[in-house]
Amino acid sequence: MIRVTQPTAPPDPGAALSLRGIWKRFGDRIAVSGVDLDVPAGSLLGLVGPNGAGKTTTLSMATGLLRPDAGTVHVHGTDLWASPDAAKRRLGVLPDGLRLFDRLTGAQLLTYAGLLRGLDRPTVAARTEDLLAAMDLTADRDTLVVDYSAGMTKKIALAGAMIHAPHVLVLDEPFEAVDPVSAANIRDILRRYVDDGGTVVVSSHVMDLVQRTCSHVAVIAGGHVLDAGTVEQVRAGQSLEDRFVELVGGRRETGGLEWLRTSSDSG
Ligand SMILES: Nc1ncnc2c1ncn2[C@@H]1O[C@H](COP(=O)(O)OP(=O)(O)OP(=O)(O)O)[C@@H](O)[C@H]1O
């Protein structure tokens, strides 16, 4: 079970990811202010929150891409910032706005990712073909990634994050720009990965997708975790979207844009 823990609680060694008191400040803006979160092994957790809530900053600190100002991150009990190599071997990451080596073809990019992770060539070759097929990209295996659509680019980056068979996948907006059929395929791949013992954290703005796909959810706003638990616990009988709006607030009357009513300017 996920808990929003007391800051003094020690990290949970049984959790796939255990964040304790992580903070990040950019100039005088505090992006993340003391996030404590345990992601249970074998869960598929959706991290949801409004724009600017601190999701990307939290995930960057949870995966070794950004050093927290304070706090700790443990990956299956290994301290990420004390033992980054050991911890990162267990992580597969799809960062937000990732720049890929897009002058490579899709197949070359996966080969590169596999070799970089220390896999031998036959293993890389076999997994590359499996992943291309799973992402429905076999026909475009020899197309340059720079010529891929946004959704195809997302899928090849996701495949690159999975090639070393990590224990934990951390995916920032994996469904953004992905067509509904590909999104369903990706959901199946992630569910199978979880059934086989993996853990997935995805950030998303699409509540319906999180409600249908995830076992757990954490709601973050203003750099804090507002609620976390199983999807059933957090939504408490409402739709996740209604519960999200209730927790986060911020709905406003859409007055003040009268000038947009172009029909009133018909003369
Ligand atoms: N490199 C940076 N320099 C300065 N401020 C930053 C930087 N990165 C993030 N921020 C600020 O930190 C806050 C949290 O940003 P973050 O990108 O983590 O939010 P998010 O929840 O991922 O948002 P979105 O849903 O819009 O992607 C925002 O106020 C943002 O302006």
Image: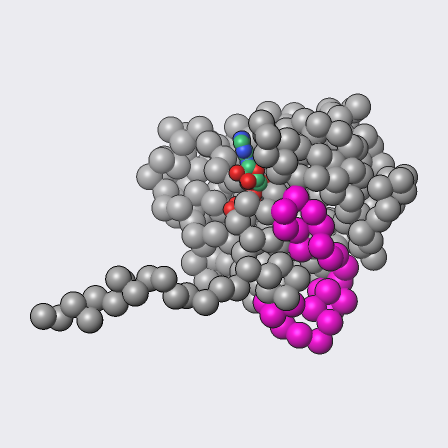
Quarter of the picture containing the N terminus is: bottom right
Q: Quadrant of residue 31?
A: top right
Determine whether, in the image, residue 156 is placed left or right of residue 75. Answer: left
Number of numbered callouts drawn: 0
The quadrant where ligand 1 appears is top right
State the quadrant of the C terminus. Answer: bottom left
Closest to the observer: 247 or 90?
Answer: 247
Whether the magenta-drawn stretch holds residue 120 is answered as no
Residue 107 picture location, percent across and down: 46, 36
Query: Residue 122, position in %: x, y?
Result: 60, 32
Snapshot quadrant of residue 145: top left
- Residue 8, relative to residue 239: is it above or below? above
The answer to whether residue 155 is left or right of residue 200 is left
Residue stretch rendered in magenta on the structure: 219-243
Q: Is residue 59 visible?
A: no
> Which residue occupies 59% across, 30% down?
28
- Horizontal side of 267 relative to 107 (left or right) equals left
156 is higher (above) or lower (below) than 191: above
